[in-house]
Amino acid sequence: MKKLLTLVLMSVLSFGVLADDWKKLGERRVSFQSEQDVIHVSGFKGKYDTIAFKVDRAPVFMKKITVVYGNGKSQTIHINRRLQQGKRSLPYRLLDGNRIINKIEMDYKTAAGGHKFAEVSVYGKRS
């Protein structure tokens, strides 16, 4: 019963990321050789207060991300979770409300599976 409740909750949370109010901010093909990559986000995309990720082609264990804002300040979010192929992450709130995102620095490690790369997309939402 507990597993069923967890699956239902994860489905509901994943559906929220699929809603129209989420906008794709950028993507990056990540190599499992470097285990650090950056997604550059154009300031023209606007201000966001929540971000989420989608992983394709292979799973990724995301250790942490650093969100660098347009004003040069940054916020580090420790994720420490495996992001499954074809799935979206939980939403992560950004500090201080709507912010222009300049780039997202990712620190991850290879998830089991023997893949050469994965594709990580970042989505933003305004409240």
Image (tube, rainbow, N blue to C red):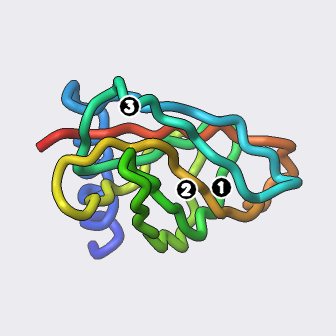
Q: What SS does tag 3 mark?
A: helix
Q: Residues within 10 Å of mark 3 (few under 14, many from 20)?
A: some
The nearer-to-camera label among 3 and 1 is 3
Residue 12 shows up from this direction: no
Residue 69 shows up from this direction: yes
**Amino acid at pointer 3:** Gly
Pointer 3 with pointer 1, Cβ within 8 A: no
**Amino acid at pointer 1:** Val
Residue labelled with disc 1: 60
What residue is rendered at 35% in x and 70% in y? 3
* Lower sequence index among marks 2 and 3: 3
* Lower sequence index among marks 3 and 1: 3
What residue is rendered at 55% in x and 56% in y? 83
* Lower sequence index among marks 1 and 2: 1
Q: What SS does tag 2 mark?
A: strand
- In the rendered structure, the answer to whether residue 84 lies left or right of residue 67 reads right
Residue labelled with disc 3: 43
Please state the horizontal and vertical placement of residue 29, each as a whole percent of the image.
Answer: 71, 36
Q: Give the answer, above or below, for where 82 lies relative to 42.
A: below
The nearer-to-camera label among 2 and 3 is 3
**Amino acid at pointer 2:** Leu
What residue is rendered at 47% in x and 35% in y? 41
Please state the horizontal and vertical placement of residue 67, each as a whole percent of the image.
Answer: 45, 56
Disc assigned to residue 83: 2
- In the rendered structure, the answer to whether residue 104 lies left or right of residue 23 reads right
Image quadrant assignment for residue 17: top left
Q: What SS does tag 1 mark?
A: strand
Q: Quadrant of the N terminus?
A: bottom left
Q: Nearer the viewer, residue 87 or 29?
A: 29
Q: CA distance from mark 3 to mark 1?
A: 27 Å
